[in-house]
Each structure stands twice: as structure tokens, then as C-alpha cells.
Image: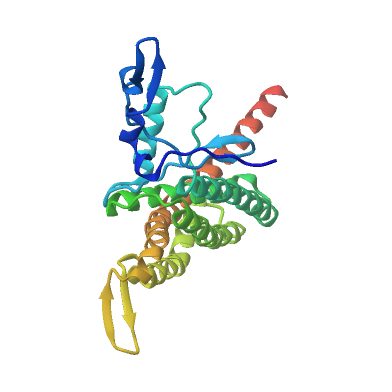
């Protein structure tokens, strides 16, 4: 086989030269521009296929100070109101895809951590109520994280804030275990639950506050973006090396501050409530048994 290729002279290989091509008609040779309207349109120079489907990749950057997630939601809303051809499928890749994977992984990790901690706590205290009370403090500590992000005007980063929430859970669990374990031991010798709670608070206030204060003070430079170079003896703020860890430290600082209030106020109140409800229920059963006899 011999490949034969017919081409115009190089001087005529132009867009305008295409309009000068003549077509033979009954009236004679007529330029093709008399029949055709030339219009400029976008064209794909290379066809890319994935799994047999034709794919076109569109990339864009957001302006400074604009969150990519906000623009992504606007695009999704626009696509919902102005649907494309049914044959066209739109898939968001890049940072959004990675964040979705990280969100799914960290959500599963947090739930698994809560489940494992629940099993250990039930085994240690032999009480579902006290175990659920500690897990409740862990879950509610995320409220402090959200308050901190709102106060600092920072967006919720799936990766670093998510890791911060999981790390925060360990500290919150430790503080509550110390408090509840002391209460359980004191209840063996003190009948009044209120007195037992007051003594528990007096004994464990210092350890809980020391843990909270030292952790917060240690993370404050990181949260404020302060970088201390001991070699050159320079202190800088907003260094690139600190920006990555700001979200993590912010989550722990505000979450731990909020959880400490829960540990010192809500947890003792819930322990007294458990004792009062148990006493009321026991008294009621005694009265019912006496009435039955």
C-alpha cells in the first residue's frame, strides 16, 4: 500500500484560504464562502479517555481569601439548577476528592476509637452509665472545637482538625477517668453522694487543671503561629512551618478548655444524679414490696 496525501501549497494553508476554495456548480465555479458561514469555536486538540469514556479535565484556582469548598458548593448548586446533557457526567477530583477520602477515614477512626474506649471503660468501671458519661464528654468536646474555629475565624480542615479531635479524645477520657475513679473509691466509705462528689472535686481539681493548663500553654505558640528559633534567637509569627499545625492546636486548646468545664461541672452533677435516681428507685421498690405484703 502506498499512502497518498494531497495538500494545498503552504501559502494557502490558512483559515482565510479555506474560504477561497471553489466549488463547481451549474453557474460555474463559486467560492465555498458563498455557502458556508465560518465560525470560531473551541476545539479539543487531544481526546483523552478513561475506562472507554471521553474525558475533559477543567482546572481552576480560587482567589485569595475564598474557600474552595464554598465555590464547590456553588458549582454543585448551579449544576442542580442547570442540568447538563444526560450523557455528561461531572466528577470533582483533586483536593475535594482527597478531603472526602480523609473525612471518611477519620470518621471511621473516631467511631472505632469511641467503641474501643467504651469497651475498656465498661470493663474498668463495670457501669454502662459511667462509661457513657465519659464518652458523652468526649463527643461534647467537639462543641468546643467548633467554638474555637468560630472565634478564630478559621475553616474546618478535615485532616488536621480531625486529627486534633481524635487526639483531644484521649485527654478528655483521662481527666474523666481520674475524676470518676476517685468518686467510686470515696463512695465505698461515704454514703452521701454530694459529699463524695465535693471531696472528689477537691482532690482532683489540681491534677485536672494542671493537665489542662500545661497542655494549653504548650500549644499556644503553635496556635498563634509563633515560631522560636533557638539557634538564631529569633521569634517570628506566621511562619510557613507553623501554618500546617495551627488547626490541630486550635482544636485541642479550645476543645480541652470546653471539656474541662464539662469534667468539673457536668460530670459530678451527673454522678450525683445517678446516685439520687438509684436511691429513689430503691425506695420505690421497697415501698411497693411493703404494700404488696
> Which residue is pictured at 35% across the width and 39% down the height?
14
Percent position (x, y) of residue 171?
A: 50, 62
**In this orientation, does residue 222 appear?**
no
- Seen from this angle, which residue lies furthest right? 293
**In this orientation, does residue 264 appear?**
yes
> Which residue is pictured at 40% across the width and 13% down the height?
25
Q: How many marks?
A: 0
- Nearest the viewer among 198 and 141 is 141
Quadrant position of residue 44: top left
Percent position (x, y) of residue 242?
A: 36, 69
Quadrant position of residue 285: top right
> Which residue is pictured at 43% across the width and 22% down the height?
83
Percent position (x, y) of residue 173?
A: 54, 58
- Seen from this angle, which residue lies furthest top? 26
Q: Quadrant of the C terminus?
A: top right
- Nearest the viewer among 85 and 142 is 85
Percent position (x, y) of residue 207?
A: 46, 69
Q: Name the side, left or right, on which 279 lies relative to 205.
A: right
Q: Name the side, left or right, on which 167 lies relative to 234.
A: right
- Nearest the viewer among 3 and 88 is 3
Amino acid at each position: 500500500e502506498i499512502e497518498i496525501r494531497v495538500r494545498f501549497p503552504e501559502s494557502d494553508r490558512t483559515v482565510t484560504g479555506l474560504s477561497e476554495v471553489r466549488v463547481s456548480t451549474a453557474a460555474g465555479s463559486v467560492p465555498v464562502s458563498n455557502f458556508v458561514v465560518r465560525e470560531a469555536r473551541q476545539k479539543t486538540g487531544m481526546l483523552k479517555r478513561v475506562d472507554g469514556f471521553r474525558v475533559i479535565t477543567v482546572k481552576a484556582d480560587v482567589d485569595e481569601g475564598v474557600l474552595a469548598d464554598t465555590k464547590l458548593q456553588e458549582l454543585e448548586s448551579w449544576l442542580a439548577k442547570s442540568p447538563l446533557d444526560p450523557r455528561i457526567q461531572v466528577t470533582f477530583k483533586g483536593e475535594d476528592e482527597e478531603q472526602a477520602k480523609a473525612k471518611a477515614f477519620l470518621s471511621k477512626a473516631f467511631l472505632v476509637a469511641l467503641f474501643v474506649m467504651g469497651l475498656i471503660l465498661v470493663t474498668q468501671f463495670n457501669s454502662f452509665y459511667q462509661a457513657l458519661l465519659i464518652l458523652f464528654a468526649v463527643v461534647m468536646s467537639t462543641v468546643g472545637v467548633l467554638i474555637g474555629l468560630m472565634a478564630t475565624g478559621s475553616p474546618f480542615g478535615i485532616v488536621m482538625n480531625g486529627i486534633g479531635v481524635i487526639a483531644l479524645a484521649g485527654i478528655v477520657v483521662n481527666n474523666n477517668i481520674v475524676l470518676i475513679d476517685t468518686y467510686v473509691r470515696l463512695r465505698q466509705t461515704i454514703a452521701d453522694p454530694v459529699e463524695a462528689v465535693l471531696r472528689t472535686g477537691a482532690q482532683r481539681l489540681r491534677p485536672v487543671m494542671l493537665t489542662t493548663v500545661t497542655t494549653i500553654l504548650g500549644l499556644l505558640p503553635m496556635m498563634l503561629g509563633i515560631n522560636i528559633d533557638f539557634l538564631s534567637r529569633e521569634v517570628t509569627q506566621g511562619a510557613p512551618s507553623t501554618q500546617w499545625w495551627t488547626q490541630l492546636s486550635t482544636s485541642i486548646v479550645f476543645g480541652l478548655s470546653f471539656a474541662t468545664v464539662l469534667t468539673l461541672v457536668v460530670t459530678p452533677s451527673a454522678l450525683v444524679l445517678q446516685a439520687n435516681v438509684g436511691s429513689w428507685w430503691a425506695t420505690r421498690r421497697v415501698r411497693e414490696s411493703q404494700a404488696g405484703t
